[in-house]
Amino acid sequence: MAFPRSWLPSRLNEGDEVSLDKPTLSRWVIGKPVNTHSYQSDERRFSSYVCAQFECHNTTNGQEGFIRIYVQVPHIGYEHADKDTLAGDATEFTPPELNAYKFLTPNHSKNTPALLAYKMDTQPTEGPVPRGHVTWIVWEKVPGKCLGDPESAFAYWDMPSDERKRVREAFLQGFPKITKMGYFPDKPSPSSLIWDKNTGRLYFVGFRDSMPFKVNERSGKPLEAWLPDFDLAKPPQKNFKWRKDYKEQKILDSSAQENANSNISHSTDKEPELTFDTGLQTWLQVLGSFFLFFNSWGIINTWGAYQTYYERELLAGTSSSTIAWIGSLQSFLLMMVGVITGPLFDAGYFRSLIIFAAFLLPFGLMMTSLATKYWQLILSQGICVGLAAGCLFVPSVAILPQYFRRKRGLANGLAASGSSIGGVIYPIMFDQLQKKVGVAWATRALGFVCFGTICISISIMRSRFQPKEKRKLYQLSALKEPAFTVFAIAMFMGFLGFYNFLFYVQSYAIETGIVDANLGFYLLSMLNAASTFGRIAPNFLADHVGPLNMLTPAVTITATLAFVWIGVHTVPGIIILAVFYGFFSGGFVSLPPVVMASMTPDVRDLGTRLGMVFAITSIGLLIGTPIGGAILADTNQFLGVQLFTACCLTTSAVLMTCVRFLRSGLKFHVKA
């Protein structure tokens, strides 16, 4: 929910009943939430409002439907104004959706849901805008299944070709009927279509922003030309302009002959049909994404082993703070480069990014193996490895939503476990090989493994379709949402302190005499092994209880463990601490993208918002461990580093809690 829960009436929990007075008195039981939308404006001449949709059923006859409530809210910047000022903005307002249903239903529209009930009311004095408008609308839940989402008619393309033909015929019959009445769904999208196979009827749904129009305004192109707009067919040529080029050309469903021409649309029957959450090719994307995580965050998570080696051997005369800049630069570039690689992924350069990284990452490690000076390590291990990891990170996150819907959380968790498993394997490889063949060849061996495993991803991963719009680098309107801004600050504070534990726990355990060098090397591997389970389990549970309800306790417990670090002075204690820190921090590092998805009103803006948060977080990654190293160099004690880590994570936990209440109010038993 992208606005405070307190703006909505309190009786909107599952099982609550509401009474609506038009066209006759009726009572409805609130069901599961469906979606929310915010239309908050900073211009006072317009009405600001929010709306929320729920499933519902009639208490008398059990008829199922959907209910949406529209509530006037304060304008941006007036959220804390006094009641008199807010009451002065109170207006009357009839949602476009209600106007559409009030016209379509009495005119016996058979291809749209029927209006079942509504109520127009005003807010009490304690409402967000005293005497402001409140409107309830209930419409029929039509039978059938939705043909897709705003990006793709995946359910439609899963159908046999003869059933797709029936859908198109129903579209060509039903579409003129509703347009003749002067109404059109919010947008020409597969999510606006519901197909009832039993009756052969196609329903047009989604009139939240629908405005009436004159019939001739929609008649500028042939009826069949609307099929590609709803992703029910392919245009005859790429970059085809209907109004300019249309001359009785055929709309394509499939044709092998036309596919032979590179300018003609691909055959939908010759290509594999789009299926989600199942199939070998689908799960191969998880395996490929696993190896991308394995070689991006997995390599970054290995830095602790290098930090210890540099402090004790290669850069023994250099301060911990100075050495830490190498690892911080890696993490910074991984996050920051994602802001650029995201648009490149959207533009179709998925394989190019992976292939580029497949050569740059081993090259960076090979150059690291030859480096003997600090500036050489900055260039090779800091910049080259960081840039390569950044090129792998966005594809590993962005590819899975093209193949998964219901099991998206599980798929992301399994893929993200690659980073922790990489953090187990790579340090052990480095430790064992550098004893036998030296540090140079141990580092080269890591490069060979990176190249081989990335090649696996290249061979099995395929981008399924391209978004219809390239995403922007930034979205300033997101910063006007309190929950988004506080979440971004929480991420910055969390990652400002988080990696200090990973970078310094080995040095702490060895230098304070808790463990010897051999066991110290395995602490990071133990931590990453536990993090594997800490990434999968919370992502799975987040689908049921809400991602923010999992992330908030994860960062809180991680902060608590950072304080516990101060009092650990035994071998069992440091091992248990590493395992627990790895498990609970696994949720902290893997859940933020899922939380951002739940906070984004329009999923097409998700990439942009993730890029903004990654950019802010990258600054914390860049300066966090050098600050810890500077504290250590100044005090010659680990207490300052431990307190800095714990305080940063505690601040993040407090801010995450604020985000939780900003989104869901003071109610605890709410999925958020």
Image (cartoon, rainbow, N blue to C red):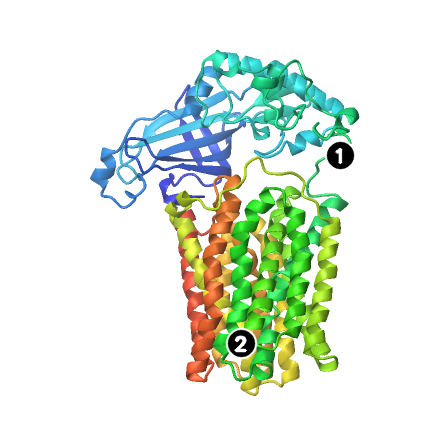
- The residue sitting at the left extreme is 84
Q: Is residue 247 left or right of residue 254?
A: left
The residue shown at (45%, 41%) is 13
| Residue 163 screen position, x and y as percent | 72, 23
Q: Amino acid at mark 2?
A: Tyr
Q: Amino acid at mark 1?
A: Glu
Helix or strand or loop: what does disc 2 sit on? Answer: helix
Q: Is residue 214 left or right of residue 172?
A: left
Image position of 398 with respect to 101: above or below: below
Dots 2, 1 in contact, CB < 8 A: no
| Residue 278 screen position, x and y as percent | 72, 43
Residue count near mark 2 (Cα–Cα under 10 Å), binned few <14, some 14–19, many ≥20? many
Front one among 101 and 451: 451
| Residue 288 screen position, x and y as percent | 70, 53
The quadrant of the picture occupied by the N terminus is top left
Image position of 48 with respect to 251: above or below: below
Q: Which mark is residue 271?
A: 1
Image position of 115 with respect to 554: above or below: above
First in sequence, mark 2 or 1: give its number. 1
Image position of 341 with respect to 508: above or below: above
Q: Is residue 284 left or right of residue 21?
A: right
| Residue 202 screen position, x and y as percent | 62, 21
Front one among 308 and 148: 308
Front one among 159 and 380: 380
- How many angstroms separate mark 2 from mark 1 (CA)? 51 Å
The residue shown at (57%, 35%) is 468
The answer to whether one can see residue 218 in this image is yes
Residue count near mark 1 (Cα–Cα under 10 Å), binned few <14, some 14–19, many ≥20? few
Q: Which mark is residue 504?
A: 2
